[in-house]
Image (spheres, helix red, strand yellow):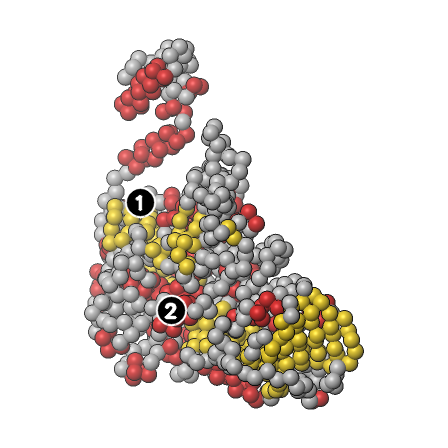
Amino acid sequence: MKLKAIVLAMTTALAALALTGCGDDGDTGATGTAGQNGADGQNGADGRDYTAVNQWYTAGQATVANASETSVSDPKGRAKNIILFVGDGMGVSTLTAARIYQGQQRGESGEENRLSFETFPYSGLVKTYSSNQQTPDSAPTMSAIMSGVKTKDGIVSVSDDAVRGTCTSGQGHEVMTALELAEIAGMSTGVVSTARLTHATPAATYSHSVERNWEADSNMPQAALDAGCHDIASQLIDFPYGNGIEVALGGGRSYFMPSSETDPEYGRAGRRNDGRDLTAEWTSKYTDGAYVWNREQFLAVDTSSTHHLLGLFENSHMQYEADRADDGAGEPSLAEMTSRALDVLKQNDKGYFLMVEAGRIDHAHHAGNASRALQDTVALSEAVRVAMEKADSDTLILVTADHSHVFTIAGYPVRGNPILGLVRGVDGSGEAAATYTTDSNGMPYTTLGYANGPGFGFGNDPMNTDSYRPDLNLYDVTDVDYRQEATVPMGSETHAGEDVAVYARGPGAQLVTGSVEQNMLFHVMNYAADLAARAEANQN
Amino acid sequence: MTLSPAHTWRNLATLFKAGALFGLFSANAFAAVAAKADSPICPAATLNGSQHFGVQYQLSGAQHGTLQLLRRQAQTAYFNPGNGVGEWWNFSVAEHPSFIRVFAKQQRRIDYYMGDLRTLNIHVSQPEIESFAAAHLRSQLRHKGAGSCADSQVYEGDYQQVHYRLLWSDSLQLPLQLTTEHKGQIKQWQASKIMPAREVDMLLSRWQQFADTDYADIGDNETDPFLAQMINQGFIEHSEHAVYNSNGQPMSGQHIH
């Protein structure tokens, strides 16, 4: 307790300087001798021996104590299973705001809350740049995570030898993904996303494409088709490794349907010009398989007898979590999809690999709509919590993001200020101020905002002609549909280039620390589960 | 563009003046079409109650232009042949309409799903969309008697400082002629052509074939020259702050959009 003694001595000395004439420090016994502990640690009435009673101090102390007793050096291959969670566009500011939002939804102040994965013992920072862009999109970032190889923007699990959009340039340069290795190793695999299953992030787990937008054959130029490139949706069904992907749940139904068929929920035509009905192919290919497209069907699936489950719950992306209850056909939550995916995957004694993406955080940010981004982040936290409860201890769980967004938490709001609200600072006594904090023109502003995006400009609304900002007193800025202000006018808010976080628990988690390149995460998974060696062994 | 049941026609004059009805009337969108003062075309009796037809409107007076309204059951589209921009609503699931913005010259589409419309604060009224935004207005005007076409009625009156004269088709449930006068400025929308079902089908089928991009995916495709151009022209976004709450109710009556 040397530190405690030093702190106590410092406190006592400072107090003596500042508060001459104050009495005893309130210890139950005599004041401790400088340089030594107080008597029994119960002398906190006057706050001097805060090392014993101050919640911030003691909580931090306990965390370090726990960590100091942990010395992990898991050997290669200790992890039987891997679950990778990706929050698309879930930068650090999104995590901070989401944790406050979740806490405040529970009636708490919010700042002290922790998202489920923020309790993980290991974390680090991840450098997200792609091989050709300082600020990347989801295609190269997820490719890096899944394959260990950074590539160019727009390219999915093909090395940067390829040229985006040029089919032949990528042929022979496909890079093996962790999911593919897991299948070759005899493990079960799953892909879950609230975006289209053919969208860049989930696509990078199972497909290889020099253009992320080649989601159906109708999206591809004839030259690419003639050169032998395949659309992303077909690659999910034609997956060549192991016994095929066991679980695929998400959106993007129309990319699996022929143009001659209409969507059961919307009546729109399918996007496939090749006439293939990929959902029918799934059930004919896998005799133990099932295809579902709404929540009722999904919950009715017998996971003990269904070993290949395809769920396509929307024509395009699934609904935002904020809108999910309003979906006409009904959609499962990310947590429900994660739970049932694990029910299917856990039946394999050789283990499993599961990737779960909260794909719409990114879309809400692009729209400049913080509320939906935060609600989808909380939904991801709930999905991780389910995995924490269901996964066995021999499971490595990683939670990360592919990239960030230009999303900011600004001003000096008082503790507990509504995270979606206007900034209300503190007064001279440190208490909540009576009025909102204002800008240099006397106009209030929100805590959350964007550096660019569609939240610039105010239609025909009256606005302050000095600041060219609207009077936000007139708006319900906490409304789910409210669009936060943006500094630079852009049709769509952009990604950001700063590092994202990664959290880890389970065998091999100790490798996640410091500031790392994004492609290193593949190597963490490969080391933890010894994927390459297991794949090689299973082939012999 | 935000439209609510309460607001849609309240700002008719503003919408037309600003060239902003559903985003179709960009400043340079109006071809120099000569104003026609003749009578509107009357729909054939066979169209009575039909939900599969089109009406071409001619705008004359202070502004000129052409606008086509296309109807196919629960689908209603507005198309400006001058700039090739269309806006296509589908109310098959009435509570959750879907919306497609069409760019015929580029043969491209942008598709908006329920969540996209909500993030953009677009809350629409199916009756207003299907009635050329005249359903609420009609209820605010005085009935003046039968009109010049069969199954038509004349309404007239002042609403929100604008004087309106409306020739309403009972069979189409649409205006055949709508004249507005505001501060001495007169504009007139007049039905100039009834479009047969096959012409509507041809247009909608053609649009269906256009390359489509989900609105949600625009952020990941800003290197697409078309999307970049559309964003710069302001077609992609256009949204005020939360003028309406999540129930589609106006948050403040003083904001006019």
Residue at mark 2 to residue at mark 1: CA–CA distance: 41 Å
Which quadrant of the structure image shows residue B256?
Answer: bottom right
Q: Quadrant of the rendered structure where residue B78 is?
A: bottom right
Q: Quadrant of the C terminus of chain A?
A: bottom left
Residue A282 lies, in percent from the top left, at 41, 74
Q: How crowded is the residue under tag 2: few (<14 C-alpha within 10 Å), some, or many (20+)?
A: some
* Viewer-nearest residue: B194 or A281: B194
Q: Is residue A199 visible?
A: yes
Residue A122's disc number: 1
Furthest-front residue in this view? B184
Residue A11: % across, % down: 34, 20
Q: Which corner quadrant of the image does residue A57 belong to?
A: top left
* Chain on which label 1 sits: A
Identify the subunit bearing mark 2: B
Do the residues marked 2 and 1 share a common chain? no
- Point out the image quarter for the N terminus of chain A: top left
- Classify 10 Å Cα crowding around label 1: few (below 14), some (14-19), many (20 and above): many
Direction right: furthest residue: B145
Amino acid type, label 1: Tyr
* Residue A405 in picture, x, y percent from top left: 37, 55
Amino acid type for the residue under numbered disc 2: Ala
Is residue A513 positioned above or below B250 on the image?
above
Residue at image point 38% right, 43% down: A119
The residue depicted at 41 percent of the width and 54 percent of the height is A487
The x and y percentages for residue B58 are 59, 81
Looking at the image, residue A185 sits to the left or right of residue B82; the answer is left
Residue receiving disc 2 = B228
Residue at 38 percent of width and 20 percent of height: A48
Residue shown at 47% from the left, 47% from the top: A446
Count of numbered tags: 2
**In what element is the residue under mark 1?**
strand
Q: Is residue A383 visible?
A: no
